[in-house]
Image (cartoon, rainbow, N blue to C red):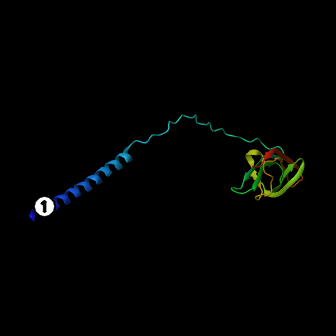
Amino acid sequence: MENKEDVSQTQEEGSIVYVVGAIIVVAVIVAAVLMWPKNKPKETASPTPENKVVTKPTLTKLVCESEWFNPVVGMPKYYLSAEGGDVSAGTQIECEFTLLKDKEAIIRETKVVPVVQSPERGGTTFKCTTKAVENIPQNTALTFVTTVKNEEGTTASCSGAVTFR
């Protein structure tokens, strides 16, 4: 009977050795994976871009310097924007955004904005942005015209061809 107990105790000790050994093997594998050097993709040295200072010219009259649009993410709506400058003593500018298809106005939005003093440019500057505009034809060539008007009634415009996608 004593011999039978020794055999079962030896089997239990053997099982414990296997379990401890398996835990050690797993720990070594995990440590090797974590410590293994990661392959980094070869990076090609790209030249660092030069920081160019863009100086805008001194203002001599009312100007529309640029116009652009930004999409509303996930929706077929767009913000129409323009910026420019003026030398008049007015306090606000009226921006009229027009989208033309075959020389016919299909969208017209107007926005009145205050001007900001810009002594370094010799006048005032402005930036107009509409509320989100809907119902703009997609994948169709359009002409984007922005007309700005100061309080004296002087106008200036900028335009370009665009396709909304």
User: Which one is nearer the viewer's eye here, 82 or 73?
Assistant: 73
* Residue 99 left/right relative to 6: right
Q: How many marks?
A: 1
- The residue at the point 26 percent across, 56 percent down is 19
- The residue at the point 13 percent across, 63 percent down is 4
* Residue 139 left/right relative to 74: right
User: Which one is nearer the viewer's eye here, 51 or 35?
Assistant: 35
Residue 111 image offset from top left, x and y in percent:
81, 58
User: Which one is nearer the viewer's eye here, 102 or 78?
Assistant: 102
Callout 1 environment at 10 Å: few (<14), some (14 to 19), or many (20+)? few
Does residue 117 appear in this view? Answer: yes
Q: Is residue 117 above or below residue 47?
A: below
The outermost residue toward the bottom is 1
Q: Is residue 83 above or below residue 16?
A: above
Q: Residue flagged by tag 1: what amino acid is it? A: Asp
Secondary structure of the residue carrying numbered label 1: helix
- The residue at the point 43 percent across, 42 percent down is 38
User: Which one is nearer the viewer's eye here, 57 or 41?
Assistant: 41
The outermost residue toward the left is 2
* Residue 164 left/right relative to 106: left
Does residue 124 appear in this view? Answer: no
Q: Quadrant of the N terminus?
A: bottom left
Residue 43 image offset from top left, x and y in percent:
52, 36
Residue 25 image offset from top left, x and y in percent:
30, 50
Residue carrying label 1:
6
Residue 51 image offset from top left, x and y in percent:
63, 39
